Amino acid sequence: MLLSLHTFAALQYILHLMFVQTREIKSFFFSQYFSDGLRISIGLLLPAAIFAQLNMLQTGLIISLGAACMSVIDNPGPVTHKRNAMLIGNALVFLVTVLTGYARYNIWLLGADITILSFLFSILVVYGNRAAAVGTAGLLSMVFIMDKALEPHEILPYAFTVLAGGTWYMIMSLLFFGIRPYRAAQQALGENIGDIVDFLRIKADFYLPEINIDDNYRKLVSKQILVSQHQDNVREMLFKSRLVVKESTNYSRMLVLTFVDLVDLFEQIMATHYDYNHMREQFGHTGILEDISKLLHRMGNELDNIGYAILSNTSYHSNVRFLSDLEDLKTRVDAIGASDHTGSVLVLKKVLINLRNLDLKILSIYRYHKIRASKKLIKNPHQVDYEKFVAHQDFSPRVLLDNLTFKSSIFKFALRVALVCLLGFVITKSSALLHFINEITGREIVFGQHSYWVILTIIVIIKPAFSLSKERNYQRLIGTIVGGAIGIAILSFVNNDTAQFIILAVLMIGAYSFIRVNYLIGIMMMTPYVLILFRFLGVGHLNVAEERIIDTVIGSAIAFGANYLLFPTWESEQLKQSLHDVLLANTGYLIKVAETITGVPVNTTEYKLARKDVYIKSANLSATFERMTSEPKNKQRKSNDVHKFVVLNHILSSYIATMASAVSGKDMHRSHPETLKVIKRSIAVLNDSTKKLGGTAIEFTGDKLVAAEPANANKPTADENLLKEQLGFIHKISLDIAKTADSFLE
């Protein structure tokens, strides 16, 4: 009997794993990453395939090169931004192709061309990610033609053919959006729900006695970075697109309203923060903490199902309700409270309130999804000015001019790229290096036939931050070596042309699907598809594989050395800015909640903007810290203090969110004078720390607008007592943050 129970449990576990893995695989195929990979592959393969049938394969390949340049600009975002960026990108690619095509007739001119263009296109990072992608497209067009043997009269026709490829890709991409205008936003929203589900599950693990709290905080902070990044992507796609925000269709409004409620739900999850060590000591023996964790995991599963339905564009009908579970939990809390062996159960009652609020948010998101096609949705029930929630990029020349200084990390990055690309160019043209490699390998290697791979490797590896370049360097190197071995194996054992073409297509789709989500896998798939492509072009696959690996090793070595030695930018240099930014954001968030308490009118938009600022600045600080830990030890600064600051900042944000949830919708302007004193002390402590870190203070004037002290001021209500306790927590954390900031500055 015992064996049967164990067998049944093992079978349940195996079935659960199979379901989870199947769901993950399906989610990938429904994701924007696979959609992007499929679209890019079609854009690149179709011209080559069509022109190959017309015995014009070379023309088709040139068109595909132009399409490849545009594909790097085809990132998620509003269609107008894509269109404008691709129009500029096509013009830029055409000009660069012509300029570099003529410059290659003189090695000195070509070196100058590579250096200047590398600098100009790299510094476009100052105008944001979309502009940086336009710069990358320009760099690719420069790399693709720098070793192309063309006669002078062939350069313009070649450039126009590249332009035709870029134009073809732009039209195709915009056509995809025109057919399914909401799909990209829907996919991003579904993926963001998945991130928040993971965040909720990490939160749930805090209640389990066997989970290490410090390790769980690290996981939580890392996941918060992804949640914030993906929320920004969804905001841009939803709120910057007039088609989605202003079009009066149920479906567009469902996406917007779901996202707004999703951000509120994330705040509710953030608000569920407590002293978990104390809770384990006080209630660990009762078993209620494990029950809370299980319920949170079940809520996460329900939210995950909704997210999967949105991602896969399918309907989801659920009968899952948590009211009975919440009632059972309430009964257990009351029983524990009546016991003589425990102290106050107020903290458990707070958890119960948060669980009820979380249940309501999940139900609200489910209802938006369920009624999207059957009922009229209110256009803007939250009364939120959506346009204020997206950042508006400043494209004025002043932004560029302000960064033309060694104080700017972007200027140093652009200068580093320019000098390193010049170095890579000089090395690839060096006969001495070729002789050295041949001596080492003992073989006659044809080096330089595809020497642009060295510069291409440098361009894709080198990043503004050392840690990002280090990671990309490792992934590029390993991916190329492993991918080269896979490519050689395919070409050696698969002799059928049709089979090779099918493998090429599959690898191509996989490469462009994974390149943004997992760069290592993307390169492992891209290398063999390039080798198969060269085989179709009549180039020996073994020699090409050798050369590609050698070029990648050389490019990786140059890029790594440059990031360490040439105008390096270390994350420790950015930490002070990140620390005071997040303190400033949390102070502003606390002030908005304090103003609500004291009776100052705070509209929904103002409050949610303050909350958004906290989430973004917190994620930026966490990302900066994570990147710093990947840098050399001697370049890191006060790692322990910064980690403590990151955790304390998360706790502070959670406590403020808890207080915001408690006062939301309540008439709290009759706050007890002692409560106002605690608020002012906390704000003063945070402001003082901000100023020490080089920031500016935010004045709190809400207490000056409070009406005369009520008659019952000396008899605070239960809500007032709870609020005062929450503010006490905030004040304590503020003092801990101040001590940590002082330690960092020592």
Image (cartoon, rainbow, N blue to C red):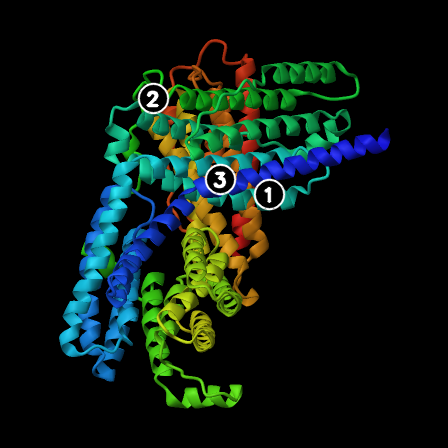
Dot 2 corresponds to which residue? 601
CA separation, marks 2 and 3?
43 Å
- Residue at x 36% of width, y 25% of height: 254
Q: Quadrant of the N terminus?
A: top right
Q: Vertical placement of 37 versus 301: above or below?
A: below
SS under mark 3: helix
Locate residue 49, reporting x and y percent: 31, 58
Asked if the residues shown at circle 1 and circle 3 are in contact, with their CB atoms under 8 angstroms apart, the answer is no
Tell me which numbered mark, 1 or 3, is placed earlier along the sequence: 3
SS under mark 1: helix
Q: Which mark is residue 525?
A: none
| 579 or 366, nearer to the observer | 366
Question: Which is more foreground, mark 2 or mark 3?
Answer: 3
Residue 515 shown left or right of residue 210 in the figure? left
Dot 1 corresponds to which residue? 217
Dot 3 corresponds to which residue? 27
Residues packed near mark 1 inside 10 Å, few (<14), some (14 to 19) or many (20 plus)? some
Q: Vertical placement of 317 versus 640: above or below?
A: above
Asked if the residues shown at circle 2 and circle 3 are in contact, with their CB atoms under 8 angstroms apart, the answer is no
Question: Which is more foreground, mark 1 or mark 3?
Answer: 3
Image mark count:
3
| 195 or 405, nearer to the observer | 195
Occupied quadrant, residue 614: top left
Residues packed near mark 3 inside 10 Å, few (<14), some (14 to 19) or many (20 plus)? many
| 18 or 637, nearer to the observer | 18
